């Protein structure tokens, strides 16, 4: 396999092979073949070999987890099937390489690369057509899954964004920082939609759903009939109602268009003010700092990200940003924005030519509400992601669904959750009856530090830190009523994966065991 610096480790599996005794049932072994890293796993008595580089962002699968069934990527928790290399859980969509192996005596050798075998045979069943409202994480993942599962009927994505589905998390990270190329951003090239027969209606808004007629009405007057409808309308930034909020140098960040406007202004600016010390606000601060701007963060909270991650991690994140030159104005809000400065509520001014407002988002519920779907701080869905209308499913930032491990109905705003819900909803649209059981997961990137978070803890009694946050080697267990509800990690990817798998098995003791094991 390839370790962090790209060097290959383990045996050359084409030349010396590996002893089968070194690959126990449910275990994995790392090696390489023709210059590429390879992971061998044993499942059900058989040994399988797949490429060691995740197809999402290239995470080292050899440093991930094999749970006896699936191989989990350490970086953003995508899952791959060892038998075929198929990416069965987002955020990876493409399969990893599947390699042929041969057993000689008590050794296995990799003999070559196998053709990917991930698409199913065409299925004759399913709804007459599927319409997906929203071309973001959930909408794209659903469309891709429908085709991967062999659905043959018409699939239409209606999106009021002008861009085809893209990597939204990157808008506040490398793309904004100027270190990711624009070609990396689309989730698929235009020809993919043509070849997959997915109609992509961009720049079109669904104005209304008429459930009784199984139709949606577009803002251009057209109507589309559906056999099944997936609502995946995501969320929109909360708008600030203060003087100057609509000036041209004031931005929100949700879409590719928003990001391009910020980049355009950043090229001409020396300083920027970011309102909001949330994940997105701070990622924007890091990215604009990378572009050479002097960045100020203004937020009402006492500690950045303190409400989600607690004071210890929040304090660490603040120090990290300060080390890169970011200046914090905590306990403050913007009261006015001028052409070349902002005024804070204490009357002080900060000179700036660029303002980014990152003060939260609201789920886009209007369509669902007007269609008469059941709502409760989100579109209510069952464990199969079906709404109160039997022909309508919902996924992503708008969906409020039962979460087995917390025992609550939750609505989260995480990329991987949205994609996985899109995948599950698609299979259920095809009649699979698959429960949504993925534990919530998100990551956030600040300079060279990635914070991974699994589980759900809207509040907690104690946040137990294991390891050392300042050394960037820690796990924080958020506990409520004696139960570990969520786990945040910095550079402890394997533990994050183990905690997620335990949560998905609804095994609170196993989650605690992961926390205890990291302490030793
Ligand atoms: C800058 C940024 C960075 C982020 N970084 C991270 C991260 O690091 N990790 C993480 O876990 N999450 C991150 N998120 C959150 C993540 O992107 C969202 O949770 C995810 O995109 C939600 O997916 P979705 O499909 O529900 O909605 P979206 O991806 O927002 O897609 C919704 C789509 O619906 C369209 N739409 C809405 N209404 C209509 C209508 N009436 N008609 C037609 N189309 C409509 C919208 O244009 C959009 O295309 C980030 C979000 C942003 C904005
Ligand atoms: S790099 Fe593997 S999931 Fe992101």
Image (tube, helix red, strand yellow):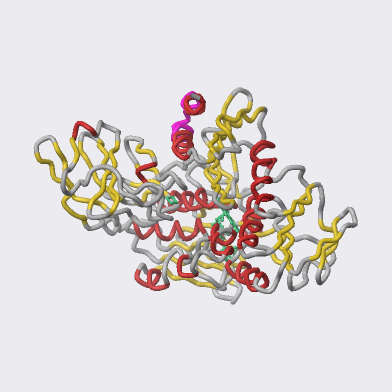
Residue 353 is a magenta residue: no
User: Quick check: can you spot residue 362?
Assistant: no
Q: Which one is nearer the viewer's eye here, 519 or 434? A: 519
User: Quick check: can you spot residue 350?
Assistant: yes
In the rendered view, does 299 fall on the left or right side of 62? Answer: right
Which quarter of the picture shows residue 233? bottom right
Q: Residue at x 52, y 33 (%)?
A: 405
Q: Residue at x 82, y 61 (%)?
A: 350
Q: Residue at x 64, y 62 (%)?
A: 288
Q: Main secondary structure of the magenta part?
A: helix
Q: Is residue 292 above or below residue 283?
A: below
Q: Which one is nearer the viewer's eye here, 324 or 238? A: 324
Q: Which residues are magenta?
A: 501-512
Instruction: Report the residue that reaches farthest toward the right.
Output: 347
Q: Is residue 118 above or below residue 481?
A: below
In the rendered view, does 232 fall on the left or right side of 375? Answer: left
Q: Which one is nearer the viewer's eye here, 508 or 358? A: 358
Residue 184 placed where, x, y %? 46, 65
């Amino acid at each position: 396999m390839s370790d962090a610096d790209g060097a290959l480790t383990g045996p050359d599996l084409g030349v010396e092979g590996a002893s089968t005794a070194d690959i126990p049932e449910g275990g994995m072994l790392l090696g390489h073949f023709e210059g590429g890293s390879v992971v061998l796993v044993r499942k059900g008595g058989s040994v399988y070999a797949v490429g060691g580089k995740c197809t999402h962002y290239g995470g080292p699968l050899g440093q991930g987890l094999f749970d006896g069934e699936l191989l989990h990527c350490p970086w953003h928790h995508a899952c791959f099937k060892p038998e075929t290399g198929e990416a069965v859980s987002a955020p990876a969509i493409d399969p990893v390489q599947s390699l042929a192996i041969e057993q000689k005596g008590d050794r296995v050798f990799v003999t070559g690369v196998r053709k990917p075998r991930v698409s199913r045979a065409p299925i004759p069943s399913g709804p007459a057509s599927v319409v997906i409202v929203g071309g973001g994480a959930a909408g794209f993942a659903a469309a891709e899954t429908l085709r991967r599962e062999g659905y043959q009927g018409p699939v239409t994505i209606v999106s009021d964004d002008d861009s085809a589905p893209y990597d939204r998390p990157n808008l506040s990270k490398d793309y904004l920082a100027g270190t990711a190329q624009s070609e990396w951003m689309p989730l698929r090239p235009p020809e993919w939609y043509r070849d997959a027969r997915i109609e992509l209606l961009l720049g079109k808004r669904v104005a209304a759903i008429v459930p009784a007629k199984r139709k949606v009405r577009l803002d251009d007057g057209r109507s589309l009939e559906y056999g099944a409808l997936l609502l995946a309308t995501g969320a929109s930034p909360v708008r600030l109602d203060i003087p100057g909020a609509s000036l041209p140098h004031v931005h929100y960040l949700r879409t590719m268009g928003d990001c391009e406007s910020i980049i355009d202004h950043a090229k001409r600016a020396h300083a920027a003010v970011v309102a909001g010390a949330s994940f997105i606000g701070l990622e924007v601060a890091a990215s604009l700092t990378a572009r050479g701007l002097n960045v100020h963060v203004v937020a009402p909270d006492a500690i950045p990200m303190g409400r989600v991650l607690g004071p210890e991690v929040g304090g660490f994140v603040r120090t990290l940003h300060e080390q890169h030159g970011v200046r914090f104005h905590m306990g403050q809000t913007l009261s006015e924005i001028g052409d070349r400065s902002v005024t804070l509520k204490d009357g002080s001014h900060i000179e700036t030519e660029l303002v980014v407002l990152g003060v939260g988002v609201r789920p886009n519920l209007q369509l669902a509400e007007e269609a008469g779907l059941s709502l409760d701080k989100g579109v209510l869905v069952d464990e199969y992601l079906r709404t109160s209308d039997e022909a309508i499913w919902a996924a992503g930032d708008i969906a409020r669904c039962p979460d087995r491990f917390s025992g609550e109905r939750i609505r989260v705003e995480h990329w991987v959750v949205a994609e996985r819900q899109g995948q599950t909803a698609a299979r259920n649209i095809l009649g699979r009856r698959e429960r949504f059981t993925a534990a919530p997961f998100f990551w956030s990137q600040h300079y060279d530090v990635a914070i991974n978070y699994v589980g759900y803890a809207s509040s907690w009694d104690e946040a137990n830190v294991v390891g050392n946050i300042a050394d960037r080697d820690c796990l924080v267990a958020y506990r409520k009523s004696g139960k570990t509800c969520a786990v945040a990690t910095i550079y402890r990817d394997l533990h994050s994966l183990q905690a997620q798998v335990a949560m998905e098995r609804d095994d609170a003791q196993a989650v605690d065991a992961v926390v205890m094991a990291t302490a030793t």
